[in-house]
Image: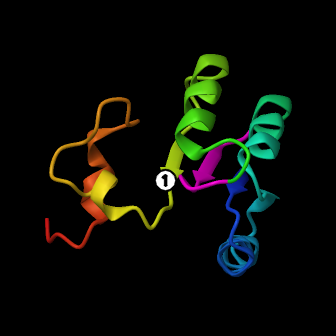
Amino acid sequence: MRILLVEDEAKVSNFVSRGLAAERFAVDVASDGQSGFELATTYDYDLLILDLMLPVLDGRELLRRVRRKNSYVPVLILTARDNEVCGGRPRKGWPTSSASRSCGRSW
């Protein structure tokens, strides 16, 4: 499985990519939204792990552009912006309504 991690915080991207590599996933890392978009549209990925607060091109715009090109790749949003993802209802334009399931709620 090939994964694209788009994260600008070096400590976070190193931690996540090392963990995934230890589980034998192939991981490419981009540190800004524009680089992430270029990789996402150049190679076939099985999963995108995407931060929302990115330099150059923010994560929401990156996701919009990727969806225009490839609407089938699954996306996992990794972000510190809890009020946007965990505000009770999914926001318009979010990939799925299950995003709020990882927000400290017991299901």
The front one of 29 and 18 is: 29
In the rendered structure, which amino acid carries the disc numbered 1? Ile
Give the image quarter of residue 102.
bottom left
Can residue 80 be seen at all in this image of the molecule?
yes
In the rendered view, does 68 fall on the left or right side of 98? right
In the rendered view, does 69 fall on the left or right side of 107? right
Question: Residue 87's spot in the image, x, y percent?
Answer: 20, 54
**Residue 76 lies within the magenta run:** no
Magenta: main secondary structure equals loop
Can residue 1 be seen at all in this image of the molecule?
no
**Residue 48 lies within the magenta run:** yes
In the rendered view, does 81 fall on the left or right side of 92? right
Judging by the rendered image, the residue that carries numbered circle 1 is 77
Residue farthest top in this picture: 68
Please determine whether, in this image, residue 16 is positioned above or below residue 85. below
Q: Which residue is found at the position 64% from the left and 54% from the top? A: 54
Q: Which residues are magenta?
A: 45-54
Question: Residue 88's spot in the image, x, y percent?
Answer: 15, 52
Give the image quarter of residue 8.
bottom right
Please determine whether, in this image, residue 69 is positioned above or below residue 4. above
Q: Which residue is found at the position 34% from the left and 38% from the top? A: 96
Residue farthest front in this picture: 56
The front one of 100 and 8 is: 8
Please determine whether, in this image, residue 70 is positioned above or below residue 3. above
Question: Residue 34's spot in the image, x, y percent?
Answer: 77, 40
Please determine whether, in this image, residue 49 is positioned above or below residue 104. above
The kind of secondary structure element at disc 1 is: strand
